[in-house]
């Protein structure tokens, strides 16, 4: 007998009447599978050991005897216990709410073909990762929260089904925050994501600084998110940029509480300051904020602090954009760098402890998690201060600052990979040693993992790379990683009905030894109902080959920068400034740049950074041409051929069509990346050419890439009529952080401009930054 057969024999389901809501959710799921109107579901005051029913419950190891379960010699703190007999009696008991809903899903859908012998005497199952925490949830709380057709309850249910355990809930209730700035400034948009504590509650110190209705709306949104999370057994928490800047009017009243200048002076046109957390009154303010928030939402289990970016920073730390600076109370003049570093690090640690200690008065297990990149100047101090409930999230414990100590799996000469993605395949054993050191101090390291939006192929969603996903998970699990920080979150199920990467995540959580090939075959057969399953498998494998062949032109453009810099809206032309200003405003008004940012005219630069250079760009272009197109074209063609065959039931082929569109979108995305590399190669090559022959060669390269991008834009334009939601997009009005539903229309403008300016002479004004900075922001006012 199979497990699925035994499940159908369940006639009665009971559960303790004091159970959390997730128990009922899980029973509903089980009952839907049983599909019998005769199944009795009954809450009971006490579960008797010999109950002739199937019991569903949440209980710690110390309470197992209440359910007639004999504890193993060394009971785990984290477990799921499943016992199912042929007659449908038994139990499913989870140590924590966060595993129950996902395990019941796993039992129904991934253990259905198992023999009942595997669990008819009871089986202990230890989740592969005790935490699968979302870190920067693109759709639920960050810029994608205004995504077209996003269903928030479905999203939370899908997170729970897949095996995620912790979720961020502090999103703004509005498309943008209240932050304002001078004309042409990019800074206000950075306050849209990772909102600080003071966007939800106030303290006695800052009361009235933000409108009450604004705080009330944000807090209501947070509480609704947390309620949904708890119903599905997830642990809600926060992701904040802190200590974040406050409106200047605060310092009119409290001038001596001014802290560090935390803005990026290139992106901002006015200084932003936070409060000096060195002052006890400010620390009391933060204690009151977290206390007030915990009183509103006692279930909050963690706060993740990102800092020294997006209007936030710790005083006198080295990575502040304007350099070490801050209030008057931490460091006096003429101290050396080592002393400043120590004091700045200790100040940050004290802040973390304030949040932890105050929150633990409500939730004793509350944790504060931070990233180490911004503390490269204070690394040792912060590292040595990590202790009970003070933890870090990272792609590597070996890194200092933003360095990446791992190499691209195909191009070993390159470390241009995005943290935690499937490109990060190696694991140095020293990571294990450092992680174990933290555990001894009752701290922990949460390692980055990503197989969804934001960290790879932004803004595309649903790109399949299941074997690579499994390999990344297996690498982490086999090296003792227990806590995952899953960057970007997942994709909304109503937008991506077939996400094979996420199915791998679900299965791996309860079966780390899974045979991934067998799992993919089973899933493909299920999704196609046995029709063309091999086509799906072949397409996934070929797509993964193409993904591994992608060298990453620049990490910024393969993540949020693709949207920020409007790479599918702005035209690729030889000389961007040859397009009249009024014809560029359709995309420049929504770019995450200031008027003097060199990225406006030079794709190799952003503010004072050189994102890449002509030599690397040429190498990347050649690698994409040599290695990526063949497998990607084969993946597209193998599905296309199957779709062109007659079938008695086209509905069985929907998954093929869905994947076909997404893989075609990936080719459009890679083509744009390739053409950006070619643009940098060609335009710089033309300007630096020493001979007319070289100029002719590079000019031809530029013309060729533009022709390619015109055709690419036409293909992309057609995909918007496919009926498949293949990218993140909002219908609430375009913002610099997410494309709008008007992108299809903008592509026609892009194509027209590229065709019109294709043969302009290649040129970049290398003095653009200084020239534009010297122009008045309001020309008419300057001459009035």
Image (spheres, rainbow, N blue to C red):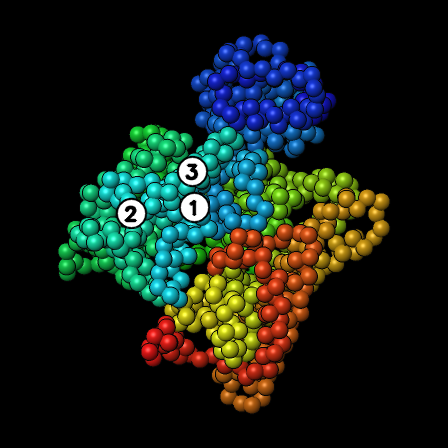
- Cα gap from disc 2 to disc 3, whole angstroms: 19 Å
Q: In this view, does 287 lie to the left or right of 664?
A: left
Numbered badge on residue 589: none
- Circle 1 crowding by C-alpha within 10 Å: few under 14, some 14–19, many from 20: many
- Please report contact status of discs 2 and 3: CB closer than 8 Å, yes or no: no
For marks 2 and 3, the one nearer the N-term is: 2
- Please report contact status of discs 1 and 3: CB closer than 8 Å, yes or no: no
Q: In this view, does 396 lie to the left or right of 347?
A: right
Residue drawn at (63%, 68%), measured in percent from left and top?
748
- Circle 3 crowding by C-alpha within 10 Å: few under 14, some 14–19, many from 20: some
Numbered badge on residue 209: 2
Q: Where is residue 352 in the image (x, y as percent from the top left)?
A: 30, 42
Q: Which of 510 and 739 is in front in this view?
A: 739
Quick one: SS at disc 3? helix
Q: Nearer the viewer, residue 5 or 705?
A: 705
* Location of mark 3 (residue): 220
Numbered badge on residue 172: 1
């Amino acid at each position: 007998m199979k497990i699925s057969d035994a499940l159908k024999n369940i006639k009665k389901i009971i559960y303790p009447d004091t159970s959390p809501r997730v128990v009922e959710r899980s029973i509903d799921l089980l009952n839907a599978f049983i599909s019998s109107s005769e199944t009795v579901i009954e809450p009971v005051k006490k579960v008797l050991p010999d109950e002739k029913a199937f019991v569903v419950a949440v209980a710690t190891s110390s309470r197992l005897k209440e359910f007639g379960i004999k504890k193993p010699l060394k009971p785990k703190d984290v477990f799921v216990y499943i016992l199912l007999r042929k007659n449908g009696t038994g139990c499913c008991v989870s140590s924590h709410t966060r595993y129950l809903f996902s395990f019941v899903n796993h039992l129904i859908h991934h253990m259905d073909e198992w023999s009942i012998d595997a669990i008819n005497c009871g089986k202990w199952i230890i989740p592969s990762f005790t935490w699968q925490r979302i870190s920067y949830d693109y759709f639920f709380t960050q810029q994608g929260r205004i995504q077209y057709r996003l269903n928030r309850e479905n999203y939370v249910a899908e997170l729970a089904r897949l095996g995620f355990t912790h979720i961020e809930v502090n999103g703004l209730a509005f498309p943008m925050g209240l932050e304002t700035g001078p004309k042409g400034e990019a800074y206000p948009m950075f306050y849209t994501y990772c909102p600080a504590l003071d966007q939800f509650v106030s303290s006695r110190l800052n009361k009235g600084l933000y409108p009450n209705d604004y705080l009330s709306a944000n807090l209501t949104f947070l509480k609704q998110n947390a309620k949904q999370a708890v119903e599905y057994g997830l642990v809600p928490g926060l992701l904040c940029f802190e200590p974040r800047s406050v409106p200047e009017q605060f310092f009119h009243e409290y001038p001596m509480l001014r802290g560090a200048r935390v803005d990026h002076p290139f992106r901002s046109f006015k200084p932003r300051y936070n409060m000096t957390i060195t002052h006890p009154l400010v620390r009391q303010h933060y204690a009151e904020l977290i206390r007030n928030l915990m009183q509103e939402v006692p279930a909050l289990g963690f706060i993740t602090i990102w800092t020294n970016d997006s209007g936030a920073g710790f005083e006198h730390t080295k990575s502040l954009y304007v350099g070490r600076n801050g209030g008057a109370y931490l460091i006096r003049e003429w101290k050396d760098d080592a002393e400043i570093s120590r004091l700045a690090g200790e100040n940050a640690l004290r802040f973390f402890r304030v949040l932890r200690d105050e929150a633990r008065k409500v939730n004793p297990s509350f944790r504060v998690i931070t990233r180490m990149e911004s503390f490269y100047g204070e690394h040792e101090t912060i590292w040595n201060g990590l202790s009970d409930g003070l933890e870090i999230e990272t792609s590597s414990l070996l890194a200092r600052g933003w360095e990446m100590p791992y190499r691209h799996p195909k191009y070993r000469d390159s470390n241009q990979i995005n943290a935690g993605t499937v490109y990060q395949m190696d694991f140095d054993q020293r990571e294990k040693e450092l992680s174990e050191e933290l555990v001894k101090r009752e701290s922990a390291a949460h390692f980055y993992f990503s197989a969804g939006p934001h960290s790879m192929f932004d803004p595309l969603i649903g790109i399949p790379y299941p074997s690579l996903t499994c390999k990344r998970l297996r690498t982490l699990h086999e090296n003792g990683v227990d806590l995952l920080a899953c960057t970007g979150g997942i994709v909304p199920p109503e937008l991506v009905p077939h996400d094979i990467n996420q199915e791998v995540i679900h299965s791996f959580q309860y079966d780390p030894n899974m045979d991934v090939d067998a799992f993919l075959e089973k899933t493909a057969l299920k999704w196609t109902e046995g029709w063309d399953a091999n086509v799906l498998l072949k397409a996934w494998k070929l797509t993964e080959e193409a993904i591994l062949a992608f060298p990453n032109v620049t990490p910024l453009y393969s993540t949020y920068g693709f949207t920020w810099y409007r790479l599918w809206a702005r035209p690729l032309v030889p000389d961007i400034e040859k397009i009249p200003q009024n014809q560029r405003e359709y995309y420049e008004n929504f770019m995450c740049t200031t008027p003097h940012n060199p990225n406006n005219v030079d794709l190799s630069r952003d503010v004072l950074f050189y994102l890449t250079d002509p030599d690397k760009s040429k190498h990347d272009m050649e690698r994409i041409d040599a290695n990526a197109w063949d497998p990607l074209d084969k993946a597209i063609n193998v599905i296309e051929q199957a779709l062109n065959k007659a079938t008695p039931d086209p509905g069985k082929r929907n998954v093929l069509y869905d994947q076909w569109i997404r893989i075609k979108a990936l080719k459009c995305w890679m083509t744009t990346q390739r053409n950006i590399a070619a643009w940098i190669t060609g335009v710089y090559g033309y300007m630096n050419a020493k001979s007319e022959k070289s100029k002719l060669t590079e000019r031809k390269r530029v013309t060729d890439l533009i022709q390619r991008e015109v055709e690419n834009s036409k293909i992309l334009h057609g995909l918007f009529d496919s009926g498949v939601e293949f990218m993140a997009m909002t219908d609430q009005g375009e913002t610099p952080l997410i494309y709008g539903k008007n992108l299809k229309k903008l592509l026609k403008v892009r194509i027209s401009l590229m065709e019109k300016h294709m043969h302009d002479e290649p040129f970049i004004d290398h003095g653009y930054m200084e020239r534009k900075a010297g122009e008045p922001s309001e020309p008419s006012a300057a001459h009035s």
